Image: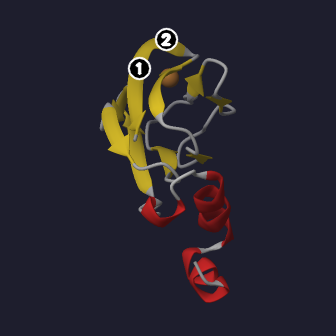
C-alpha cells in the first residue's frame, strides 16, 4: 500500500487498515446506525475489519451505545453521534445503558 493510497483512505481508516492483519483485504466502507424510537437500525450489522461505525441519535431523548469491555459512548442527545472503529473480528453485542432492552449487534469479519 503506497503512501498516496493511505492518504486517500484517510488517516483514521489507514490506522485501522494497518492494525488489521489482512491489510490488502481491509476496506473502509463506513457504516451508520440510526437510533430512533428506542431502536437501533439496523439492529444487526456485518462489517469488515477496519470499518468505522457511527451511531446517530435521532430520538427525542438521550441514549448511549455500550459494549461491555469494548466501547462506551457518553449520553447522546438528539442529533449527537458516536463512532467506533472495529479493528478486531468478532461479534460485538451492545446496548443502551439508559434503556437496557435496547440491543444491537455488530459482526466484524
Ligand atoms: Cu436508550
- Pick whichever, 57 or 26, lies toward us: 26
In the picture, the disc for residue 100 is 2
Residue located 49% across and 11% down the image: 100
Quarter of the image for residue 72 reads: top right
Residue matched to label 1: 103
Residue located 57% across and 83% down the image: 5
* Coloration mode: secondary structure
Residue located 61% across and 37% down the image: 76
Image height of 72 relative to 88, above or below: above
In the picture, the disc for residue 45 is none
- Pick whichever, 52 or 41, lies toward us: 52
Contact? badges 2 and 1 (CB < 8 Å): yes
- 40 horizontally vs 1: left or right: left
The residues bearing labels 2 and 1 have C-alpha atoms spaced at a distance of 7 Å
- 62 horizontally vs 102: left or right: right
**Residue 41, can we see it?**
no
Position of the N terminus, as image quadrant, is bottom right
Dot 2: within a 10 Å radius of its alpha carbon, few (fewer than 14), some, or many (20 or more) residues?
few
Amino acid at each position: 500500500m503506497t503512501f498516496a493510497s493511505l492518504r486517500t483512505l484517510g488517516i483514521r481508516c489507514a490506522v485501522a487498515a494497518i492494525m488489521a492483519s489482512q491489510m490488502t483485504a481491509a476496506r473502509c466502507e463506513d457504516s451508520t446506525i440510526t437510533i430512533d424510537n428506542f431502536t437501533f437500525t439496523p439492529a444487526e450489522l456485518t462489517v469488515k475489519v477496519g470499518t468505522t461505525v457511527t451511531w446517530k441519535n435521532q430520538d427525542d431523548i438521550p441514549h448511549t451505545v455500550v459494549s461491555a469491555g469494548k466501547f462506551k459512548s457518553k449520553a447522546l442527545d438528539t442529533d449527537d453521534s458516536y463512532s467506533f472503529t472495529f479493528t478486531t473480528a468478532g461479534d460485538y453485542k451492545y446496548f443502551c445503558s439508559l434503556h437496557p432492552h435496547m440491543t444491537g449487534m455488530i459482526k466484524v469479519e
